Image: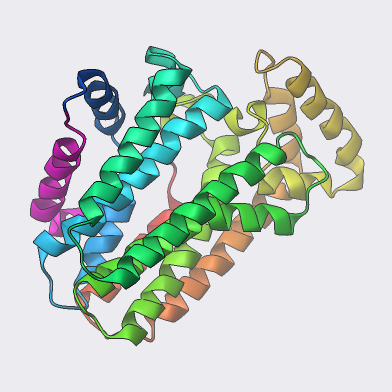
Amino acid sequence: MKLLDIFGLLKKDMDYIEKELYRSVQGEQKLLSETSLHLLKAGGKRLRPVFVLLGGKFGTYDIERLKLVAVPLELIHSASLVHDDVIDNAATRRGKPTVKSKWDNRIAMYTGDYIYGKALEMTAGLSDPAIHRILAKAMVQMSIGEMEQIRDFFNTGQSVRNYLLRIRRKTALLIAVSCQLGALATRAPEHVSSLLYTYGYNVGMAFQIQDDVLDLVGTEKQLGKPPGSDMKQGNITLPVLYALQEPNLREPLLEEITRVQHEEGRASASDAIGMIHQSQGIAKAEALADRYMKKALDALDQLPNIKTTKNLRDIAHFVVKRTH
């Protein structure tokens, strides 16, 4: 089964979530509504709402309760992207102009803040304090992850462990709580929500590693941005760190990264990408993503053998094998 088939099973509810997403950012301030809608209409995989809805299948499924988790989680993710684009000075996302590119940095920052506020406003409809605590902690960790990324811009001396801690905070935790909160919102058993968290965390780690690999092996058409954008923005990702561990490549690759840094985004990263392709960096990163996927599948093996568990297994495979 392909990912689109899984979404097809949820099509009616995902269409509803999409409408609620657009409705949630409408407000009296027309420009903030416009900039927020510009971001949301650029599209995306909507993985987090999908994970919420699938997590909800393990309890008493109720789309009206689940939307109070699914929509805020996608809004929180979207708000973080607006801020990311300002920090990274990104002109496009998913092939469309970013908010900071179409308007400016100040409007982009306030758009992100506005979307965060709208997410919190919507979760107020849930009375379970555990859900609010989990969501708040995830947002704090995301912010720490963003600061760590800024701290490590062009830091070629960072460890693989630092990289993994950063993507845990920036990406994996929000996917983990999407799975977990879908179950909690529909009152699934606690051990089920815990296993779903473990599954989501490992899928999230694999997802981000694969995302970083795709930035080096994908085409501009596939990525919606030029290949090597991470490096040009200063993000030293796992394949690069592994390539830097190879003695014959370390010095020339360091020189290329320094050149890209000093030319402040004007330089092509193609020579550096070519060196990474010659290394074992991409293969080693993909192997680690596979290990995280195996841990995700191990968690699923302990869940009830229902159709939803199979859907989650299919998504895990898609995450590691996708091309965009």
Which quadrant holds the N terminus? bottom left
Q: Residue at x 28, y 47 (%)?
A: 119
The one nearer the camera, 56 or 216, is 56
Task: Give the residue drawn at x 74%, y 25%.
Answer: 271
- Left or right? Give the position of 323 relative to 155: left
**324 with respect to 258 (left or right):** left
Instruction: Indicate whether residue 28 is drawn in magenta.
Output: no
Residue 23 is inside the magenta segment: yes
Q: Residue at x 21, y 50 (%)?
A: 122
Whether 255 is drawn above or below 290: the answer is: above
Give the vertical position of 1 relative to 215 (above or below): below
Image quadrant containing the C terminus: top left
Instruction: Write the start and end of the magenta stretch as one range.
Output: 1-27
Q: Position of residue 238 (x, y in %)?
A: 67, 49
Residue at 16% x, 31% y: name it: 26
What is the count of numbered marks?
0
**Residue 189 placement: quadrant:** bottom left
On screen, residue 268 versus residue 46, left or right, reads right
Residue 151: percent from left, percent from top: 71, 40
Q: Is residue 308 visible?
A: yes
Give the answer, above or below, for where 31 lies relative to 2. above
The reply to whether residue 219 is in sight is no
141 and 271: which is toward the camera: 141
Picture coordinates of residue 6, whole percent (x, y): 22, 58
Please tell me whether the stretch drawn in magenta is mainly helix, strand or loop: helix
Above or below for 249 versus 187: above
Report the colour scheme: rainbow
